[in-house]
Image (cartoon, grey):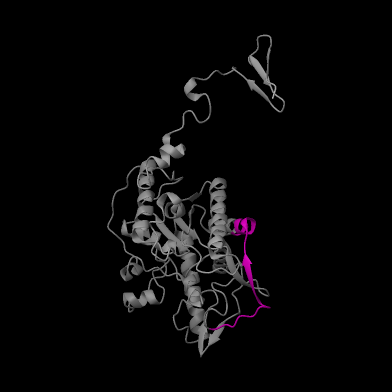
Amino acid sequence: MFLGIVLLPPSPCFARFWCASSRVVLCQENPVSVETANPYSGLGPNSFWRSGVANVGPFGLTELWTPKFRIVPKDRIVTAGSCFAQHIGRAMADRGYHWVDAEPAPPFLRAEDARRFNYGIFSFRTGNIYTPRMLLQWLELTFASRDLPDEIWQEGGRFFDPLRPVIEPEGFASLAELQAARSSTLASLRKAVTTANVFVFTLGLTESWVNTKTGLEYALCPGTVPGCRFDPEKHVFRNSGFRPLMRDMQAAIKLMRAHNPGLKILLTVSPVPLTATASRRHVLTATTLSKSVLRAVAGQLEAEMKFVDYFPSYEIITHPVFRGMFYAPNMRSVEAQGVATVMQHFFADQARVFGPVKKRQKRKPAAAVAGFNEVKCEEELLGDLSS
């Protein structure tokens, strides 16, 4: 390749270099020091893999998150979404933060029974909300922008809510009981959203099952739980891509902010792999696709909206630098040490950016009494179908 140097009359740009395919212009209109000769020159050690990761190892990592907004113990913090959101709610309460339980168990229920009936798991009794569309659906029902579904599942004289078919272990005794319980949850969700300071949502899945006639998205695939037989003409599989997921999350956030203009949104992505996939891919590659798309959605929302932030709990658990050490032997469940490490980064980065907070008396969610590692993950029911 020919490289020529042409000397030109005195000019702010003192020399020009030509080659066969490109031209480079060196310009000294604004001379810079050697230390800042290029955009990478003045960056700190965490901007480079060797100094930020390789040299410090998994337990030397710092500044993984630069939070946009401060979260203090008095803030009303609502948690919802995939299984991992339960860990965040518990850790917040254990540190004395005001984790909101907008739908507490009746006082006559023992703690273990309250957990069995899915109280104190999330901030309201919706069960897992795995997808952006399911979150939007719950919010539309809550704020009356969507009609309540007529579809009710029945089996053995018991009634099951297709929005949360396993919320009652043996189903509801009557249609009226189911409807009253659903109304209570919608009222609790409305109260939580309109009074919260921070809404923490953990994105879990891209895969879902939908009713072709009504557009209703189910919490679980029909036919895998009591009350409904699978109908291939009516129940269709959907594996949403970036654009529909982005639209659904934008709509969900817009709806929440319409009823609570000061609400801040903190997004996370669940590090828990898929229990099963209906995509016809291997479950390992299906998991990678699902989590990658969700991570991209969260990153784009964080970049576009000043009141939306992303916390990297997903990276802390799943990244190869941690060598899978935070997973249980099934390579799916997250161990207590992993959750503790995630929350250490959370509180450390909050303190680094905004300063330390005054400690408050611990607040423990009802679910915490059943054991740290016992999370409610409805998707795990699909694991029982494995041959």
**Left or right position of 44 against 237:** left
Point out residue 43 in the picture as x, y percentages from the top left corner. 46, 32
Confirm whether residue 78 shows in the render: yes
Q: Nearer the viewer, residue 189 or 44?
A: 44
Residue shown at the point (38%, 47%) measured from the top left: 58
Q: Check the image and name the residue furthest to the top.
A: 9
Q: Quadrant of the N terminus?
A: top right
Residue 385 or residue 307, whichever sits in front: 385
**Relative horizontal placement of residue 325, taking residue 3 as reference (left or right):** left
Q: Is residue 225 magenta?
A: no
Q: Residue at x 53, y 27 (%)?
A: 38
Q: Position of residue 312 (x, y in %)?
A: 45, 51
From the viewer's perspective, is 223 left or right of 56? right
Q: Is residue 235 magenta?
A: yes
Residue 9, horizontal then vertical, whole percent:
68, 9
Instruction: Name the foreground residue: 234 vs 59.
Output: 59
Q: Residue furthest right?
A: 20
Is the residue 151 above or below the residue 121 in the image?
below
Q: Residue at x 34, y 69 (%)?
A: 366
Q: Is residue 126 visible?
A: no
Along the viewing direction, whichever of 58 and 32 lies nearer the viewer: 58
Q: What are the residue bounds of the magenta stretch? A: 227-248
Q: How many marks?
A: 0
